[in-house]
Amino acid sequence: MSSGWTTKALAVLAKDIRTELRTRYSLNALFMFAFTTLVVVSFSLGQLSLNVQVLSALYWIIIFFASMSALSGVFVKEEDGKTAQTLRLFARPSVIYAGKLIYNMLLLTILCALLTPLYVVFMNVTVPDWPLLLVVILLGIIGLSGATTIIGAIVAKANVRGALFAVLSFPILLPLLVAAIGGTNAALAGAGWDGAENQVRLLVAYAVIMITASAVLFDFVWNG
Amino acid sequence: MVRKYLQIGLFVLLAGVIYFSFTTPAPQQMIGEASRIFYYHIPMAWLTVVAYAVNLIYAVRFLKTRSELDDFRSLWSAELGTMFCVLATISGSLFAKVTWGVYWTWSEPRMLSIFILLLIYGAYLSLRAAIPTPERKGIISAAYSIFAFPTVPFFIFIMPRMMLSLHPADSVVDKNLHFTMGGTVLPIFLVSLFSFTVLYFWLFGLGIRLHKVQLARSEEA
Amino acid sequence: MALSLTVEKLSKSFGARKVIRDLSFMVSVPGSLGITGRNGSGKTTLMKILCRLVPPTKGKVAIRDGDAEVASAECFNYLKMISPEMALYEMLTGYENLKFFSTLAGVHLYRAEQDKLLDRVGLVERGDDLVAAYSSGMKQRLKYAVALLAKPAILLLDEPTSNLDDAGKAIVREIIARQKSEGMLIIATNEAEDLKQVEYVIRLDN
């Protein structure tokens, strides 16, 4: 019984999940960062309430920086642990990329699942349109993972890792952030699906373009 | 010999551009003297994009040929592009101060797009600096260059539609694609655009010739 | 299986430093080759080039199945390498490492077969322990188990007996003997004992 492509990609995913559950490096980094930032902001604001635009922007700022602290780990730990070369002799690049991409999406989904309710509570947010908000967040997660996974692979081959990851990701993530913040804004302001139409379209286009480009370029980065 | 004459020709053209850009009437009456910066700022911005395009083309070629020369062409164009980008950003910022009273604003999409290009160039150069092995350097940075590219059309074409623009609209080409500059402005502008583009290609070729000489020298040693 | 590995006029330089000069050879199945030379003479680099992990500066490496050349991207299906630079997953157990790599290799191993592999390298009792808890000799032996699970046609061993005690070395001898007769074996080492096991030896110091 031989395994197909999907089985192999899922095996990579399962391996990363199993390792993560045992060490919790990425989950800790992600959640600690996001939670601490949230508490500090909420505490400093006291009774002051923020308008919808600021709330939307702040949410994605937290997600962005949390991602910068953790999402390159998925490739960095392979290089540091010297398992990258072993992997190269056992699997083709597409399998590895797919597994790691889904892993990053999973990490971010867990982060947002925990962060969003806390955010709503701590920042006193009223959400008139939960479905739209959830769709925007989900699309944002997909786009964010799509863009940062390959940059993580790029950074794993370089020296300075942490700072470089943010420097490389930022210009590429800006369109995503603009669209996600705009979409969140529409959801929180009750502008409905019409108000968020441009942003949602942009988010979908971004995710598609980034994941396609990554799939094509990953071969070169991984084997380069 | 022909090269010598072309260089002298370029010098004359650029000298002419500089002279006439200051002595003829200002391009846009509404903005006044500050609009003279058109002659320089727009070519700089144009060349930033051209340089990125050249960087991109050689990045793709390098991934196929793995020739060190293609990688160098990619890098050299990025370095030139960074220089033009910095000049475009500074000239744009000065123009903003004179006309709108602020050195910087995020609500101006053109300012944002030149800033993004500056970030991409900066990221590209930082990435190259951070990778020790020469072979990897070329491949990884070429991949990044290609990957960063989709962001650029987004900021140049999509963002302006999503935001209200302070940028002088219709300063070059209006809705009917007719040139809106009249009189002495158009010729000086076109010559400026042309001369600076030639300057870029000349600098580009120069750098490559220098690199080839250095390579040949190190191979003899 | 008319499988062969051919190297034609291979050179590798790191900047100005030429590590491998104009190397040519061919190995077939069954067959074995030893690569030796001073430290820093390029043994590990050559091994990596043969595995397609590193590109050559000039020249060519080709794996041929009969007359047809195997595409570069598919070469990993034909060979496996053991090297000090390649590690296994420390946060997984021995069994989990076997299961993971066998899935990637497209091979399904029943528990009994996993046990057989671990037994062959003398690690059956420690299969449920995390690799992080293994000694360096045990890690080396697990690498053999992982490399062998895919029954590779070409096996490359870089410093095959490093970190191994006498029991470990005996295990490796058995593996080498099997691979020599059933497939292709390439060893990079300075140990005279190991070099005795191969048909031909290439010296890399010019």
Image (tube, coloured by chain):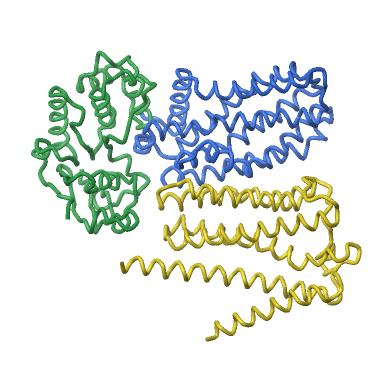
Residue plotted at (18% across, 31% down) = C161
Lateral position of residue C156 relative to residue A160, left or right: left
Residue B158 image point, x, y percent: 74, 49
Residue A106 image point, x, y percent: 56, 25
A196 or C44: which is nearer to us?
C44
| Quarter of the rendering containing residue C31 | top left
Relative height, residue B36 to residue C14 (above, below): below
The answer to whether one can see residue C84 in this image is yes
The answer to whether one can see residue A1 in this image is no
Q: The yellow chain is which one?
A: B
Residue plotted at (48% across, 46% down) = B130
Q: Which chain is green?
A: C
C160 or B80: which is nearer to us?
B80
Residue B195 image point, x, y percent: 67, 74
Q: Which chain is blue?
A: A
Lateral position of residue C79 relative to residue B208, left or right: left
- Quarter of the figure that contains the C terminus of chain C: bottom left
Lateral position of residue A125 relative to residue C99, left or right: right
Residue plotted at (25% across, 47% down) = C46
